[in-house]
Image (cartoon, grey):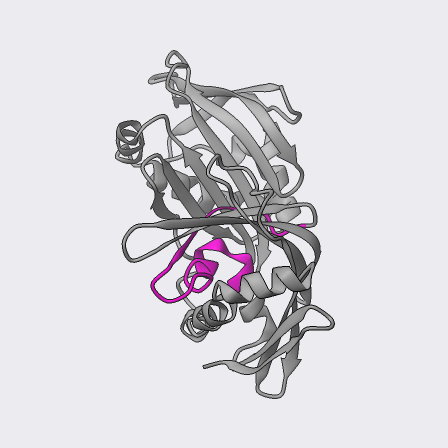
Amino acid sequence: MPVTNVSKDPQALTMTIVADFPVPVRRLWDAYADPRQLESFWGPVGWPATFTRHDMIPGGESHYYMTGPDGETSAAWFEFLAVTEGESFEVLDGFTAEDGGRDQGAPVMRMVFAFEATDGGSRLVHTTHFNSAEDLEQILGMGMEEGTLSAMSQIDAVVADLQSFGAGRSVRTQLIGDRQARLSRVIRGTVDQVWRAHHEPELLRRWQLGPDGWTMPVCEVGTAVGETYRYEWEREGGEDRFGFTGRVLEINPPHRSVTTEAMIGQEDASTTNELTLTAVEGGTLLSLLVTYPDESLRETILATGMADGMESSYSRLESEVLSA
């Protein structure tokens, strides 16, 4: 068990948990920055978490839900107030209402996570600030302390894994619920470099090609909310032409964009794509959360080899654009 101390201060309205780990600060930090890893320990044992959004930048948000042993769910959110990479982050933490919005009648806590190096590895100091004595009593009465300690008991196993989440791994596909899929990969490049490669036509044409033998004759990029984009590909020689189009719904360079996407000629079967870029050891974690109209379309599209095509493109991005 990594936790070395738990202290509650009723006067200051805080609860502080100190935990030590035999890994460098960067490894521990990345476990919180990468939603794939965070999901492995954020929920208490028996209540795994699923993150559908995780923007670890000031002003960013996280949306997640925990699933109990009988299938019941409990949803919540973060709002990032401050982030100093590798050192600390501060969030507001609250509950999600049944309609998907923030539960205005539930307590909201402020949590500060501070990371520091030690002789044996790294230390995490996790301090929760409550707005009132009533909130403190209510949240602790709901089992927050026990749940947090249960969740943190799982971190050691996550940070001991040095391979599964590193650079050099191919695209990983995770199905979420009935209509979503998250495709993730660590790209060897900075967040700014990867963002530019996704939003500058002359760079996109060099790598977003899928298997060898294809070209991208049309590359019209949307860079502001409301703008449309259009990408078209064809085999060398002009055969088998196809493309996608959509609209920019949200954009926050260089970390997040949300767009619609539909195959040209099939605009009634549109998806929503949420792209998030996060700095991690070895490069940039690219997460693409795709929301499909229904489960059938999700399975159909994934079965076309979508992840393999993305892997071919990302490998080309690293070798022909970011290493140039």
Residue 185 vs 15, above or below: the answer is above
Residue sitting farthest toward the front: 134
Q: Nearer the viewer, residue 56 or 14?
A: 14
Residue drawn 42% across the image and 20% down it: 262
Q: Which quarter of the rendered picture does the N terminus lie within? A: bottom left
Q: Nearer the viewer, residue 199 or 47?
A: 47
Q: Nearer the viewer, residue 304 or 61?
A: 61
Q: Is 206 positioned to the left or the right of 84 in the image?
A: left
Q: Is 130 positioned to the left or the right of 69 in the image?
A: right
Queried whether the magenta region covers residue 39, the answer comes back as yes
Queried whether the magenta region covers residue 62, the answer comes back as no
Q: Is residue 314 visible?
A: yes
Residue sitting farthest toward the top: 265
Total number of numbered labels? 0
Residue drawn 66% across the image and 37% down it: 252
Magenta highlight range: 31-57
